[in-house]
Image (cartoon, grey):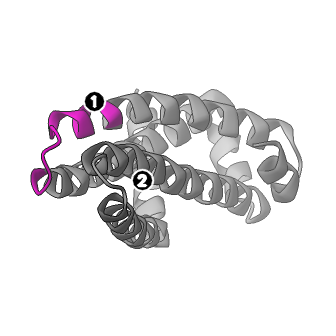
Amino acid sequence: MQTLIAFTKLNFVKIVRERSLWGALLLLRVLLGACLFLSILSLGEGPRVLLNAALSSIEISALLLLIFSLTFGFYEDKNGRMMEIYLSCFPEYIYTAAKYISYAILSLIYLASAAILLYLLLLSSPANGWQAWAGAYSLFLKMLLFIGVNLLFCSLLSSAPLALLNT
């Protein structure tokens, strides 16, 4: 259990150091600005359009974050021989579980910050703010499934382009 926690901390620090989270948050701000403009253009359906388009943009940016960060991080470990060092002392399921947990924490942090931004946007419109949190929770569950599928393809396939295409 201590090795799992240690690998999870190591992977999470590595993910934060890549700064892909900050790029995805910047992309999210741009997409939310476009959603706000789109809600202004829609006559009478502004809050509904804002909520639907914003949740879709949150999902797209979260998927892009996870696809590129997880796939390239996995193959960076594999090509840099770090995976061989890890797996020489510990079984592979601990390495994979630590990757899964660290990316689950990353997606939780990302979706929580995106839900806060969406909640602040929805306060300015007559929509209910709790819908942002309900949408973020369903997106988090979807991201957990996606992380598992992405790790499966990364573990089974030999190159990063193949894993990206199959994901």
Nearer-the-camera pick, 42 or 8: 42
Nearer-the-camera pick, 107 or 40: 40
SS at circle 2: helix
Give the residue type at disc 2.
Phe
Q: Could you tell me which residue is drawn at 81 percent across and 48 percent down?
A: 163
Relative placement, left or right, of 89 versus 50 is right
Magenta includes 126?
Answer: yes
Q: Which residue is mark 1?
A: 134
Tell me the magenta residue range.
123-135
Q: Position of residue 122 (x, y in %)?
A: 18, 50
* Residue 41 higher or lower than 163, as above or below: below
Identify the image quadrant of residue 32: bottom left
Residue placed farthest to the front in the image?
Answer: 43
Q: Could you tell me which residue is drawn at 49 percent across and 70 percent down?
A: 18
Nearer-the-camera pick, 89 or 160: 160
Relative placement, left or right, of 47 versus 7 is left
Q: Which residue is mark 2?
A: 12
